[in-house]
Amino acid sequence: MITFKNKYLKAGSVCCGIAAALLAMPLFTSCSDFFETDSDRQIFEPALDEKTDSMFYTLGILKGLQQVADQYVLTGEMRGDLVAVNGNTETDLQRLADFTADATCKYDSAYKYYRIINNCNYYLAHRDTTLLTGSRKVAIPEYAEALAVRAWSYLQLAKTYGEVPFYTDPLTSIGDANSNIPTKDLQGIVDALTPEMMKEVKGSEKVVCANVDMYSGLVYRMLGIPQDLFTPLFAVSRMAGWCAHRFEEINSGKRIIRPAYKSVSHEKKYVDIKDR
């Protein structure tokens, strides 16, 4: 923190600043221009077919996530019996804890999630993903984030309420909201949303789920196996299968397969197992 030794120094600095502003005023064409608020740099109607305007819509989606944060945390904590209410707890939380909450409870609102979902649906339906800066598609990262936020919101709804109304087109009228909207459970939501997310994020519609190797590193660490041995263990356990695939492709498939095989060893004479 700056400490002023002279109590008049700060006042003098302010006076100098005011004087400088007054001396600069003649540089303006008129006093009315000095107080003009219109600016051609201010965006009044952001467009989703522009490179940068989409950030206004993205901020709207993020605002929805902020508004649902309390509900998400508290319902999760109560579902896991990690928190308890007492006489000082507000009524909505007490009702949520004893399963007497109704549609008026601010911590039990599906509407907050559907507001995020509908914002994402609108963004995804209207965003121009072909915009380029050089050779880079500038809209794809934001587009993928909107897909992920929509998927997360649907999964939270399904975890809390079970089978829920599911739609991917933006609802723009009361009539749309009152129409016959199909419902999906948790698995149905995953099946419906995953292919598009994989296409936008990975560039392929092929859904690749995590296998056991995603978790094996944690198991190796818990067993005290050195990290340098993680990859050798992964490879050794698959060598027989890799060799079998290699033989199969050489004899019949004739396709490129992975991993790529390039021998770095020298040909050796086979030694019988009992002589090794």
Image: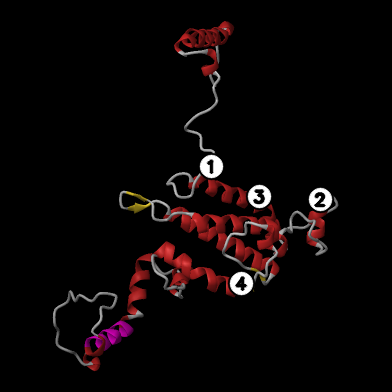
**Residue that label 2 marks:** 90
Q: Is residue 114 left or right of residue 139?
A: right
Residue 92 or residue 124, whichever sits in front: 124
Which residue carries the number 4 mark? 186
Query: Which amino acid type is shown beneath numbered disc 4?
Result: Leu
Label 1: few (<14), some (14–19) or many (≥20) C-alpha neighbours in 10 Å: few
**Residue 113's x, y, as percent?**
65, 58
Q: Is residue 251 above or below residue 118?
A: below
Q: Which residue is at 51% across, 13% downward?
A: 30
Q: Amino acid at mark 1?
A: Glu
Kindly report which numbered mark, 4 or 1, lies closer to the viewer in this rendering: 1
Q: Which residues are magenta?
A: 240-250
Of the two numbered discs 1 and 2 in the rendering, the one whose residue sits closer to the viewer: 1
* SS class, disc 3: helix
Pointer 4: residues within 10 angstroms few (<14), some, or many (20+)?
some
- Circles 3 and 4: CB distance less than 8 Å? no
Count of labels shown? Answer: 4
Q: Earlier in the sequence, mark 2 or mark 3?
A: 3
Marks 1 and 3, the one that precedes in the sequence = 1
Q: Position of residue 75 (x, y in %)?
A: 71, 60
Q: Given the image, on which type of amino acid does mark 3 rest?
A: Gln
Q: Residues within 10 Å of mark 2 (few under 14, many from 20)?
A: few
Q: Quadrant of the N terminus?
A: top right
Question: What's the magenta bit mostly, secondary-structure-wise?
Answer: helix
Q: Position of residue 195 (x, y in %)?
A: 47, 70
Q: Secondary structure at mark 2?
A: loop
